[in-house]
Image: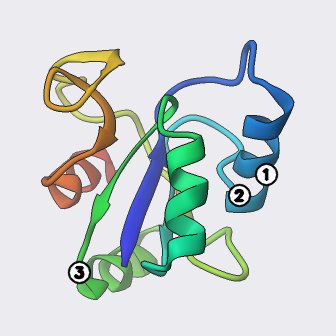
Amino acid sequence: MIAVMRIRGDVGLKPDVRKVFELLKLDRKFTVAFLPDTPEYIGMVKKVTDYVTWGEVPEKTVKELEGKIRNVGRAFPVFHLHPPRGGFKHSIKKHYPYGELGKRENMKELIERMVP
């Protein structure tokens, strides 16, 4: 399972990128969606990689969040989170490891910093 989190706003988005956000239910910043690890979803995530951070997470993480935060998704779990405690460590306009965008190894750690 992969977690996809939107960390940039929607000012100046191209229509095709806006549509992918609509399909993934990532309607605002700090929203995380837990998606199956299939080629279709990976392709969608790569389309919006300049606006999101994503990575693999264990199934247990989804269960923990469902106990703390209301799920707003239908086809797959989607949660609205708070900004991370301590802020982001790098620029949100550059790709990981020099920034916060793109694929990362420690997605679970970032999600834990954002749970109220």
> In the rendered image, which quarter contains the N terminus?
bottom left
Kindly tell me whether residue 48 is visible in this rendering: yes
Neighbours of disc 3 within 10 Å: few (<14), some (14-19), many (20+):
few
108 left or right, relative to 6: left
Q: Which residue is drawn at 79% across and 51% down?
A: 22
Image: 50 above or below 24: above
Q: Indicate which disc residue 25 carries.
A: 2
Q: Is residue 70 above or below residue 81?
A: below
Which numbered dot is residue 22? 1
Amino acid carrying mark 1 in the image = Glu
Residue 55 or residue 39, whichever sits in front = 39
Q: Is mark 3 on a helix, strand or loop?
A: loop
Mark sitting on residue 9: none
Residue identifier under label 3:
58
Left or right: where 63 falls relative to 110: right
How far across and how far down the image is residue 12, in percent?
Answer: 75, 13
